[in-house]
Image (tube, rainbow, N blue to C red):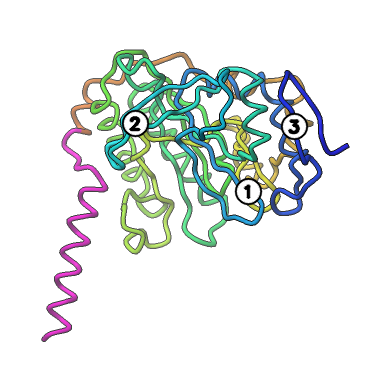
Amino acid sequence: MSDDERDGVKLTNLDQPLFEGATKRDLVDYLDAVSDRILPVLENRPLSVIRVLRGQGPFMQKNLPKYTPDWVKRYGMWAETSKRQVSYALCDDRRTLLWFANQRAVEYHPPLMTVDADAGPTHLVLDLDPPAGDDFAHVVKAAGLVRQALSDFGLTGAVKTSGSKGVHIFVPLVPGQGFEDVAAATRALAARAEQVDPSVATTAYIVEDREGKVYLDSTRAGGNTVAAAYSPRLRPGLPVSFPVAWDDLENVRPADFTVSTALALLGDKDPWAASMPEPQTLPAGLVEQGHTIPVARVVAMHEGKRRARQRAQEDTA
């Protein structure tokens, strides 16, 4: 049967191809089965999704389309870049998740804050990204450096595969810590991890400056989004972002966890919730140190302009 109905949501064309050999039914069945585990990490957060429509390339959707059902919860936010009000979805229940799945929404990217912006960021996150063509063992080594840096400041975090080639490390936060302070602390943690072994990891924002090292991305702060735990990713085999125990990290590969394999590995467990430490307060010294570290994007912008000027001078010499 190509059509179905669940929780009042009409599901259509389920047997049509979706991506890399997977069908739309594979996506719907997977998300339905993990709904009780993915919904807690999406709840009350303005949601961005990546959809893949037939005959089109993937695209990120933030603003809800006009045909969105009235029962989908909405949250309006002003988008400074596009100078418009964006109506985000709040994916707080199974019905909404199924509707998104039927819309061929494959990836689920919530921000690191809820609609209660006064509460501040809910997590500090470091995104570890290997260089092109590198193996996962390099990422595992870099994750160990971040774990050591966290320990040096009396902090603990949980780790999951990104669903691509790297990992995400999450530190839950006590509410009320400011966005700028959390962003600063993220920079300081990345810098500390780099210092532990600069031959393995780097904080260099410009790709050509990374010299084959794992990039410690400290820019995922505040309103920026991160692929949710258990979210599928638009990669060959439809891998999912999957929680891994720290001590098991060296024994897995991101491709181990897909929409086809993850459910059997999970059983009835929720390892992301189980592995998440209690919310923590960032040490004042860490925050202060971070405020002395320039924002990576700003540094990269100025450096890019400087290099462009230098190239132009060389070309005219």
Q: Which mark is residue 11?
A: 3
| Residue type, mark 2 in image | Gln
In the picture as drawn, the residue positioned furthest to the bottom comes out as 317
Residue numbers of the magenta segment: 291-317
Residue 219 location in percent, x, y? 34, 40
Circle 1: residue type: Leu
Residue bearing mark 1? 53
Circles 2 and 3: CB distance less than 8 Å? no
Q: Which residue is mark 2?
A: 85
Quadrant in the rendering for residue 46:
top left
Q: Main secondary structure of the magenta part?
A: helix
Residue most extreme to the right: 1
Q: CA distance from mark 2 to mark 3?
A: 30 Å
Q: Please check the rendered image and state whether residue 305 is part of the magenta-colored stretch, yes or no.
A: yes
Label 1's element? loop
Residue occupying image coordinates x 75% and y 50%: 17
- What is the spatial separation of the Cα atoms under label 2 and label 1, in whole angstroms? 25 Å
| Residue 222: x %, y % from top left | 34, 29
Q: Quadrant of the C terminus?
A: bottom left
Going from N to C along the chain, the mark reached first, 1 or 3, is 3
x 47%, y 22%: residue: 74
Reply above or below: 50 against 147.
below
Question: Helix or strand or loop: what does disc 2 sit on?
Answer: strand
Residue 116 or residue 210, whichever sits in front: 116
Label count reads 3
Above or below, 168 relative to 136: above
Q: Is residue 260 magenta?
A: no
